[in-house]
Amino acid sequence: MSSKFQLFFIVFILSMLGISIAFYKVVYLDVPLTPHEKKSLFTVTSSIELQKTKNPIVVSLSLPKPQDGMKIISNEVDSGDFGYTISHDNNLDRATWAKRELDKATKIYYKITILSDTLYTASSQELELLSSGIKDSQIGLWDESEQNAVKTLIDYVHKHSADDVTFVAELITLFNAKQTIEPINTLLKIKGETKISLISAILQHQNIVFHKLRGIELLDGQKDRMLITMLRVKFANKWYLYSLKDGQITQSSNFFVWHEGNSPLLITKGESKAKLRFSVTETKVSATTIAKNMIKDANAEFLNFSLYTLPSLQQNAFKQILLVPIGALIVVIMRILIGFRTMGTFMPILFSLAFIQTTLLSGILLFIVIIGAGLFVRTYLSKLQLLLVARISAVIIVVVAIMSIMSIVSYRLGMDEVLKITFFPMIILSWTIERMSILWEEEGSHEALTQGGGSLIVAVIAYFAMDNVMVRYITFNFPELLLVILSIIILIGRYTGYRLSELIRFSPLGK
Amino acid sequence: MWFTSFAKLQKKGVVGMNYRNVELIGRYNKRSSYPLVDNKIITKKIAHDVGIAVTELYSTVESQSQLKNLHDILLPYENFVIKPNHGSGGKGIIVITHRNGDHFVKASGDVLTLEDLRRHISNTLSGLYSLGGRYDIVIIEKLVVFDPMFAKYSYEGVPDIRIIVYRGYPVMAMMRCPTRSSDGKANLHQGAVGVGIDLKTGKAINAVVRNRPVEKHPDTGYDFSGLHIPRWEEILNIASLSYDMTGLGYLGADIVFDKNMGPLLLELNARPGLAIQIANDKGLRGRISFIDAQKDIRNAKERVAFSMNSVSLI
């Protein structure tokens, strides 16, 4: 009883382990589960256009940070012949390009590729809060009429809103209205104040926590765009994103934040006409490509053991090798649950691997031709009274000869598929011939054909299981699921019920 | 009906291959004991030690070089049987019933030359018939002269008695009678008749050919209802003792009935097949669980008595 418990325990542990690693890869690393799945990748390109100048020139662009729901997969820079450095300063990454002089107008590109993924959470860096208190003096510096205007405005907005959420919306809407109300006109006249700075000042005055953001919507085909400024406001522990254009609350799911805070997005020295523009393109990428990137780039330590870290030659070998357990599973099912009799336990797998190379139909034909011809020759050899080892060696040579002749003849006839005959395992073929002929002599043609045919059927079924695109994809990208196959095989190994074939065999007993 | 259902087999207590492999062979047959039964020379030796009569070993051929002397080795014997030491399922066995000049005559009447025998032995030595294809030894043993009372039930071969021994208790028995289609071999696969034998009396219960019930032997035409194996208790004793000598909990004992010597142990099998259930028209499960329920420790004789009186009723 305890051994049974142990068995179930092991099976449970193994399958849970396999499934949870696979689950982790699908959900958190975003490895697609099927090869057909397409994912959207957005490429956001910032271009800085610079006019020619004799002055030394330094351009510095603020770079985006990781953010929730958007995973930065790669970034790429095209700096022309500029010197290029990345600096990390004040919790902000900046790319800096520099050049002594510029003899023609030039564009610099900084490109990032994003995978939009709702479950991704950025490593939470405490966002710098631009809120309240400290800068309240800004309003205090204004004159009385201006301060009164602020008060009137706040009163007005307060009356026309229900809570902080609607307060902000109303405030922004008022600033954007075609016919602005009096207090706003007064405020806008203040020197050096803009719409944004005024709204910020009022929000600070009201002790509302907010950030100023600049970013772009992830929509395909945006070209030559400037970044949109948004306000992200915190109420009751939730963040709301306000468009500064119309005061609407927008969905943040496809809004990619490039820059946060009050620091300048672009700093230029020695050049005044730098033009910064953004564009977005969407590409649909096959699952396999993403899987490869995701598994390869994942920071998770254990994924460094991924098969993608191997050289590509070995990777291809493993694509084949990882199919063998699937074949083994088929053999286990066919033998233990169905009750097929095969010649040699795992011989069918080797043949189905060969069928994958030759394609099924020509594979089966080749199999039958070689085995048939081999059996014929073997019958003659047995008359020569050779020792066993010598006889099998002779059969091997005959098999090689048959294979070569078939290749040459079919190549002359223009049937290229036959050339793949080399993928047939010769030694196994020879042993199959030897075993089959002994079976034929000992137990008669019926038994030999039953077992030979059984092997062929199992090989064909294993071929269909292994040559499946889905199976190939899953076995290579989720090798941990081998553990699940292992536990299934362990379970079947303890199956003590009847085989399907025994329903026929023991039918006289079931009367 | 050419097929049946899981439920019906279950109800009948039929043991399937998977159950046999896991619960009987896997549980009760220790790997280390296999050589005792797979190697016929060892089987003969240990059987002799516990006092079981076996077919007499004439000689062995252990290497290809001995084949030169094959003529001399065979010289003293008018009839004999050639067997692979590690063979199974009756493979590679040649039965020579008498000589005709320089030639050897098989049970079927086919004539072999010394060269034919030499080739066969050479093949056997290279492992053609052995389990796993390893090098083998050839044994030459005395031909069993089967009792004429079995002649009615056999065609050109020696019928043998297969007894399944579970944890020392004989649980089921059958007689395997060669037919023309089985080529004189007592092999059910090839069409020999399987006759279920009552554990208590040694009388036939039921007979099948290729899994289908028959009344009479297909070649000799005799009705199996008249089959009654003599010295039955003695035969069961041999079977029961083979448990003591091998320690295998699930065991098939093959016994032949020699005209002069009486019951002889032919060979033991650590993986006996399940066709015996069809021959007896009965599943093994009931008897197995009946024996599992036994708490008393019994010696071979007591186990035989228990099998005859109690197990046979299940």
Image (cartoon, rainbow, N blue to C red):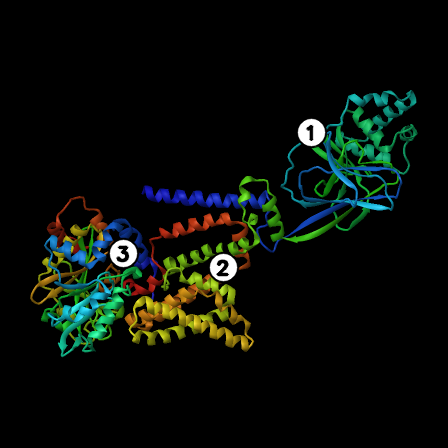
**The C terminus of chain A: image quadrant:** bottom left
Q: What is the quadrant of residue A508 in the picture?
A: bottom left
* Position of residue B259 measured from the top left corner of the image (x, y, whole percent): 8, 67
Residue drawn at (13%, 79%) of the image = B101
| Dot 1 crowding, Cα within 10 Å, few <14, some 14–19, many 20+ | few
Q: Is residue A247 visible?
A: no
Residue at numbered disc 2: A466
* Position of residue A38 measured from the top left corner of the image (x, y, whole percent): 64, 53
**The N terminus of chain A: image quadrant:** top left
Q: Kindly report the distance in space between the C-alpha atoms of the residues bearing marks 2 and 1.
A: 55 Å
Q: Kindly report the distance in space between the C-alpha atoms of the residues bearing marks 1 and 3.
A: 71 Å
Chain letter belonging to callout 1: A
- Residue A379, placed above or below residue B230: below
Chain letter belonging to callout 3: B
| Dot 2 crowding, Cα within 10 Å, few <14, some 14–19, many 20+ | many
Residue drawn at (53%, 41%) of the image = A302
* Position of residue A216 measured from the top left corner of the image (x, y, whole percent): 76, 42
| Residue furthest to the left | B260
Residue at numbered disc 3: B13
